Image (tube, coloured by chain):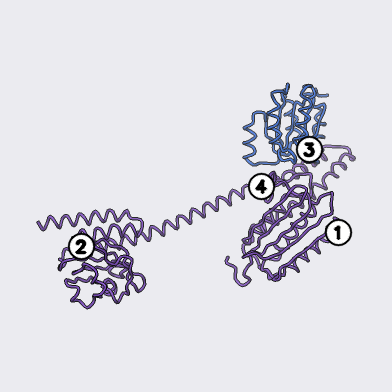
């Protein structure tokens, strides 16, 4: 008779081991343990207690009437705490006769006797409790079974921890992989565009070369040679911009300068003076009270220069350019808006391509398709963003959001 | 004197230097009577539309760039496909582009009206074999 019961209890334990091996979180483990802990010993209640620094946290329970689920007690004032601190189990036949028991906490409950075992004996992380409504002296078998359950629980908790760690690592890895493949796609696109923009002038040079070679007449040769000059100029400019693009893309540790917005803006306007004068452009500037910004000087100047010279280049033939450069603070951003009354862009048609590195048209030797792409890269490299608003024939407004960088320590 | 294999050829490309060069190279093959140059797809498609009633003035060959302002090569091809049922002449369209992007090449292959995809520079030999195979 005794053997049959023992066999039943062991099979309950084996079943619990199987179930626990499938548990993937703490809640899952607790749900199995509180139930099994009560049924293998035939107790009237079971608790699942977790150590939370110097407190015992009664995380879960399964009992004939409520015990202490959700409550916290100091390790020193509580029998589960005693178990964890002393790394041994506690077997109490009459709780009101034991000084380790906080009697007040037990008075509202049904508990007369209890058995408490630590989870992970070497360095306890919790405890499992068994409670009886009638005075009961736990048998050796009951103690052995509950200890075995506690050991399995410790392994399961450890497994869950590792499982979560792995899951997190895997997620990180997947995210990284996604990022890399996106970068790769961008790089591929970048290469095709570069090869397109370089191939066009190069193939012209190659053809002109063979034509120069293939003709006897000096006059013809000279005529073809004249055609070479604009192509090489174009190629040269394209190459310069290409170098700029790659510089933005590879500068990981940029030097941050402590800048004065007014000084830098005026410096750029000074550099653009010839273009401003020849276009008869009027420029208005506005600055916030706090004019300092930590940013790479090279980038800031390049951003302003690119946007202002775009405004001049794409001016309307019907009116003199009016460009409003406005710096202001908004929440965590230092914002720059550059508003013009120029040609404007049909964003519906071209918006998608606006900031992208794109293939170049040959009609405007001036634009090599890199300008706004570089600006965007310089803004985004420092955690900012750039947006455009525009209506054809009315003008454009570019808004740049720059992160107010911490001069002393940058997170990267 | 070689026999003219082609009455009219269209060159559709916005690159002025390329226009100049390819015109010379075609002239020197002496296989073509008339070369017409367009700076974008729109100019070329309008010319085809206007010539539909006189098929003899339509080109036998079109050298088409892909990346052009106003109307690019792809858009030109779309418009041409719509016109095609009314065009009473076999027109060989060659894409001549600087793009080596496989996406472009594949897209061109999927259009049956495109005879071939040529990556620039287009050499004299290539042009000659193109014109002689008509």
Q: Are marks 3 and 4 on the same chain?
A: no
| SS assignment at label 1 | helix
Q: Chain of mark 4?
A: A
Front-lying residue, A38 or A253: A38
**CB atoms of marks 1 and 3 within 8 Å:** no
Q: Residue at x 77, y 64 (%)?
A: A285
Q: Are marks 1 and 3 on the same chain?
A: no
Q: Residues within 10 Å of mark 4 (few under 14, many from 20)?
A: few
N-term-proximal mark, 1 vs 2: 2
Q: Residues within 10 Å of mark 2 (few under 14, many from 20)?
A: some
On the image, the x and y values in percent for residue B45 come to 75, 31
Task: Name the residue furthest right.
Answer: A219
Instruction: Locate the C terminus of chain A and report the quarter of the image it occupies.
Output: bottom right
Front-lying residue, A226 or B66: B66
Which of the chains is blue?
Answer: B
**CB atoms of marks 1 and 2 within 8 Å:** no
On the image, the x and y values in percent for residue B54 come to 79, 21
Per the image, the residue denoted by label 2 is: A44
Per the image, the residue denoted by label 3 is: B39
On the image, the x and y values in percent for residue A155 come to 30, 61
Q: Nearer the viewer, mark 1 or mark 2?
A: 2
Per the image, the residue denoted by label 4 is: A352
Does residue A337 lie above or below A346 as drawn?
A: below
Q: Nearer the viewer, mark 3 or mark 4?
A: 4
């Amino acid at each position: 008779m005794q053997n049959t019961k023992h066999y039943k209890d062991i099979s309950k334990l084996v079943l619990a081991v199987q179930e626990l091996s499938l548990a993937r979180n703490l809640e899952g483990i607790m749900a199995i343990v509180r139930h099994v802990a009560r049924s293998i010993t035939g107790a009237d209640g079971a608790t699942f207690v977790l150590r939370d620094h110097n407190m015992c946290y009664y995380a879960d329970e399964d009992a004939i009437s409520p015990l202490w689920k959700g409550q916290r007690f100091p390790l020193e004032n509580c029998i589960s705490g005693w178990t964890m601190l002393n790394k041994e189990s506690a077997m109490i036949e009459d709780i009101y006769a034991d000084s380790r028991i906080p009697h007040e906490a037990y008075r509202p409950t049904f508990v007369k006797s209890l058995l408490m075992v630590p989870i992970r004996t070497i360095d306890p992380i919790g405890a499992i409790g068994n409670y009886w409504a009638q005075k009961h002296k736990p048998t050796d078998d009951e103690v052995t079974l509950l200890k075995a359950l506690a050991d399995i629980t410790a392994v399961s908790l450890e497994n869950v921890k590792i499982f979560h760690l792995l899951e997190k690592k895997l997620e990180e890895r997947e995210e990284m992989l996604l990022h890399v493949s996106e970068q790769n796609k961008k790089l591929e696109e970048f290469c095709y565009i570069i090869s397109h923009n370089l191939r066009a002038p190069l193939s012209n040079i190659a053809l002109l070369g063979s034509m120069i070679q293939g003709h006897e007449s000096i006059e013809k040769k000279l005529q073809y040679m004249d055609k070479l000059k604009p192509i090489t100029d174009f190629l040269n400019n394209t190459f310069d911009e290409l170098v700029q693009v790659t510089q933005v893309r590879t500068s990981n540790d940029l030097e941050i300068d402590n800048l004065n917005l007014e000084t830098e803006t005026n410096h750029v306007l000074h550099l653009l003076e010839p273009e401003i004068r020849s276009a008869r452009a009027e420029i208005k500037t506005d600055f916030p009270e706090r004019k300092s910004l930590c940013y790479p000087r090279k980038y800031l100047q390049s951003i302003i220069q690119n946007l202002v010279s775009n405004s001049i280049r794409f001016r309307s033939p019907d009116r003199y350019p009016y460009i409003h450069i406005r710096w202001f603070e908004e929440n965590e951003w230092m914002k720059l808006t550059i508003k013009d009354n120029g040609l404007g862009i049909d964003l519906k048609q071209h918006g998608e391509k606006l900031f992208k590195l794109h293939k170049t048209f040959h009609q405007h030797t001036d634009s090599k398709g890199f300008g706004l792409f570089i600006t965007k890269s310089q803004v985004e490299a420092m955690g900012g963003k750039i947006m455009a608003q525009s209506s054809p024939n009315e003008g454009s407004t570019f808004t740049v959001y720059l992160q107010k960088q911490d001069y002393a320590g940058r997170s990267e | 004197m070689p026999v003219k294999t082609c009455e009219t050829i269209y060159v559709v490309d916005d690159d002025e230097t390329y226009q100049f060069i390819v015109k010379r190279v075609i002239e020197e093959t002496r296989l073509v009577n008339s070369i017409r140059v367009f700076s974008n797809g729109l100019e070329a498609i309008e010319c085809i539309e206007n010539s539909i009633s006189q098929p003899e003035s339509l080109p036998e060959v079109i050298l088409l760039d892909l990346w052009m302002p106003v109307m690019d090569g792809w858009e030109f091809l779309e418009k041409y496909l719509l016109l095609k049922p009314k065009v009473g002449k076999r027109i060989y369209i060659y894409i001549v582009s600087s793009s080596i992007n496989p996406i472009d090449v594949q897209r061109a292959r999927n259009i049956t009206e495109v005879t071939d995809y040529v990556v620039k520079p287009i050499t004299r030999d290539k042009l000659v074999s193109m014109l002689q195979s008509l």
